[in-house]
């Protein structure tokens, strides 16, 4: 079966400085795959390159077998890739409803059913539909950012640090919603500093260091690796 998303020897540079050094990864349909690594490892660059916000120097990005690395960002959305960026980047002076409608800018026709779906997934957004995005709590803004991306009906959802700056109870709720989105049929590529929660949620994982993939495998295997526990989970390696 063709992977829904496949990166092959993807290299990205900032000027002459390599950010990704020929990485390859696969995301199968229906999976949650997580990218782990320290700040500056290349995780956000990977997502931004997939979504067309950065240009690859070499290598390929295939979506359902189709090369998309040359597409503009709005065309990447059009083929079925949604992106929730780090920092949420909602429109603070637009209300919740307007923010969600912006997520469907590529689509025509009635949005009622889509909005009802988002409000079932995030009831608090339904309650605050006329409230400006900038007045929402951090957790509500993250829900709005995810809901806005879901309005484009993505086959694959790219999530960049969805737990950043959120209280533990809110993080638990966000991760539960991510799992529900996957259960409803959306494949997810997740970048997350909270390695424990990401690996407990994901099917498989990749570990990036300085633009290279240094480890990959089932999430349970990575979670049990002492090197990963020492580097990312704050635990001492076994002697």
Image: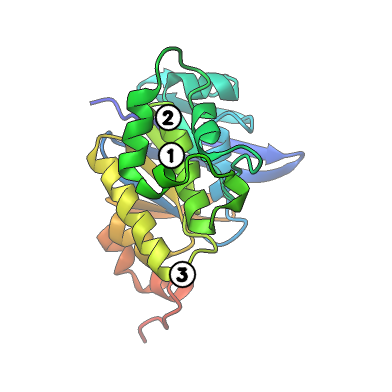
Any part of residue 20 in sight? yes
Nearest to the observer: residue 128 or residue 64: 128
Q: Nearer the viewer, mark 3 or mark 2?
A: 2
Residue pointed to by mark 3? 232
User: Disc 1 vs disc 2: Cβ atoms closer than 8 Å?
Assistant: yes
In the displayed orientation, state which residue is furthest to the right.
15
Res. 21 in view: no
Distance Cα–Cα, label 1 vs label 2: 6 Å
Image quarter of the N terminus: top left
Is 187 left, or right, of 230 in this rendering? left
Q: What's the image's color scheme?
A: rainbow
Name the residue at 58% across, 45% down: 133
Q: Nearer the viewer, residue 89 or 74?
A: 89
The residue drawn where x is 40% and y is 22% is 111
Residue 233: quarter of image: bottom left
Residue labelled with disc 1: 147
Disc sitting over residue 151 in the figure: 2
Measured from the top left, where is residue 100 in percent x and y?
Answer: 49, 33
Q: Residue at x 50, y 54 (%)?
A: 161
Above or below, comparing residue 204 to residue 51 in the picture: below
Q: Quadrant of the C terminus?
A: bottom left
């Amino acid at each position: 079966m063709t992977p829904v998303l496949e990166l092959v020897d993807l290299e990205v540079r900032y000027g002459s400085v390599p950010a990704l050094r020929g990485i390859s990864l696969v995301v199968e349909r229906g999976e949650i795959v997580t990218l782990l690594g320290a700040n500056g490892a290349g995780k956000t660059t990977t997502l931004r390159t997939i979504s067309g916000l950065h240009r690859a120097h070499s290598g390929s990005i295939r979506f359902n077998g189709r090369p998309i690395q040359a597409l503009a960002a709005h065309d990447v959305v059009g083929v079925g890739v949604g992106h929730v960026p780090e920092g949420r980047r909602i429109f603070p002076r637009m209300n919740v409803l307007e923010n969600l409608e912006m997520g469907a800018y590529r689509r025509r026709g009635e949005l009622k059913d889509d909005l009802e779906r988002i409000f079932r997934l995030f009831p608090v957004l339904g309650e605050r539909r006329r409230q400006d995005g900038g007045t929402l709590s951090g957790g509500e803004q993250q829900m709005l950012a995810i809901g806005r991306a879901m309005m484009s009906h993505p086959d694959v959802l790219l999530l960049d640090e969805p737990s950043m700056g959120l209280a533990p109870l809110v993080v638990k709720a966000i991760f539960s919603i991510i799992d529900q989105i996957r259960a409803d049929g959306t494949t997810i590529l997740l970048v997350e500093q909270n390695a424990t929660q990401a690996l407990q949620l994901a099917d498989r994982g990749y570990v990036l260091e300085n633009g290279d993939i240094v480890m990959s495998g089932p999430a349970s295997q990575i979670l049990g690796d002492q090197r990963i526990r020492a580097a990312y989970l704050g635990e001492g390696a076994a002697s």
